[in-house]
Amino acid sequence: MQGVSGSAGALGFLGLSYAMENPDTLKLIDVDGGEGCITPSEETVQDESYQPLGRPLFIYVANASYQDKSQVQDFVDFYVENSTEIAEAAQFIGLTEEQTQTAQDQLAELN
C-alpha cells in the first residue's frame, strides 16, 4: 500500500479492507466485467457483481469426514456459525445472512 500510495500513477491490487481503511490515500477503481462498471464495496463483493476481482474464499471438507469425524463437524459448524466474526477479525468480507443460512442448510443435509 505504501509503494502504491507513494508513487504517482501507480496501480496495485490490494484487499478491499485496505482501500476502505485508507480512502484519502487510495482510490478505488470501478471494474467492468462485461456488464458495466461496478464500484468495489462490501455489497458488490458479496453479491458477486464486482467481477473478476471480487472473489470468495472457501474451505473444503470431504462430506464423509464431516459425517464421520466429530472434530471435523465441530470445526466446520463453528466456522460457519462464527464466519462473520472470523472474517471481520481477518479483515475479509463476511458472508451475508442468506449465505450463512445456505451453508448451514447444506451442512444439515449431511447429517
Image (spheres, helix red, strand yellow):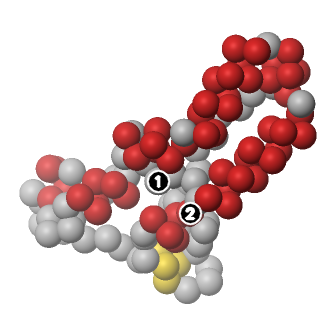
Q: Secondary structure at mark 2?
A: helix
Residue under label 1: 93
In percent of width and height, residue 102 lies at 75, 53
Quarter holding the C terminus is top right
In percent of width and height, residue 18 lies at 28, 54
Which of 51/8 is in front? 51
How far apart marks 2 and 1 lie (CA) works out to: 7 Å
Picture layout, residue 75 above or below residue 4: above
Looking at numbered disc 2 in the image, what kind of residue is underneath it? Answer: Gln
Q: Secondary structure at mark 1?
A: loop
Image check: 15 left or right of 77?
left
Which residue lies at the image location 68% right of the left edge and 22% below the top edge?
74
Task: Using the rendered view, name the quadrant where residue 6 is placed.
Answer: bottom left
Looking at numbered disc 1 in the image, what kind of residue is underneath it? Answer: Ile
Picture layout, residue 101 above or below residue 31: above
Which residue lies at the image location 66% right of the left edge and 51% below the top edge?
100
Residue 10 is at least partly visible in this image = no
Which residue lies at the image location 49% right of the left edge and 79% below the top edge?
38
Which residue lies at the image location 67% right of the left edge and 56% below the top edge?
99
In percent of width and height, residue 33 lies at 58, 74
User: Label 2: how many residues lie within 10 Å, few (<14), some (14-19) or many (20+)?
Assistant: some
Image check: 4 left or right of 16?
left
User: Label 1: how many residues lie within 10 Å, few (<14), some (14-19) or many (20+)?
Assistant: many
Q: Earlier in the sequence, mark 2 or mark 1?
A: 2
Seen as rendered, the residue at the extreme bottom is 36
Residue under label 2: 46
Residue 29 is at least partly visible in this image = yes
Q: Are marks 2 and 1 in contact (CB under 8 Å)?
A: yes
